[in-house]
Image (cartoon, rainbow, N blue to C red):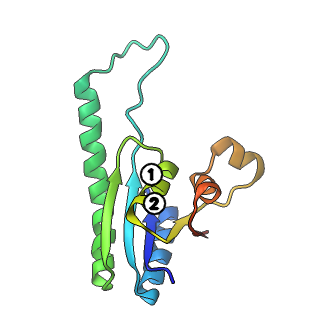
Amino acid sequence: MYTHILIPTDGSELAQKGVDHGLALAKALGSKIMLVTATPAFPIPTGGAAWRVSPADIENYNVRCKKDAEAMLAPIEAQAQKMGIEVQALHVPDTAAAAAILETAQKAGCNLIVMASHGRRGVKRLLLGSQAAEVVASSPIPVLIVR
């Protein structure tokens, strides 16, 4: 049924719950997985900020984000391979998490997204936002939320 599962992570303890569940599900179903993490664009100061951004600042940020993403994804990729799961890992730079998840799922032909969520409701969700809620609301494929 689910042959290609997208598993997003930000490296947090909460996201690891989604990763663990997604790996177990992929193993049980014989599915392949796509791991994805996203990093936001360089934060450009606005207003009367005294600090001016140079191209080198942006380049250093992008290099660090790529290195951090690779370091975060590598152990999960190794764990999946050890479990006998076909895995591909992807870092999507300069993109909000929900947009990266939805775009990657579509481009990779995934038929399930497994991700973690805090499960915030009401005002907390409104104030803090929810990448998971955005994915659920916008995804054309099933989304399994792990709490």
Q: Could you tell me residue 16's position as x and y percent? A: 46, 67
Locate residue 1, reporting x and y percent: 51, 84
Up/down of 1 relative to 131, above or below:
below
Q: Residues within 10 Å of mark 2 (few under 14, many from 20)?
A: some
| Amino acid at circle 2 | Gln
Front position among marks 1 and 2: 2
Which residue is tagged 1? 100
Q: Can residue 49 be seen?
A: yes
Picture coordinates of residue 11, whole percent (x, y): 41, 59
Q: Would residue 55 appear left or right of 145 to someone viewing this image?
A: left
Residue sitting nearer the eye, 7 or 20: 7
> Callout 1, which amino acid?
Ala
Secondary structure of the residue carrying numbered label 1: helix
Q: Which residue is mark 2?
A: 106
Q: Is residue 11 visible?
A: no
Q: Residue furthest right?
A: 122
Question: Which badge, 1 or 2, is on the more N-terminal residue?
Answer: 1
Q: Residue at x 38, y 73 (%)?
A: 33
x, y (%) of residue 15?
A: 49, 63
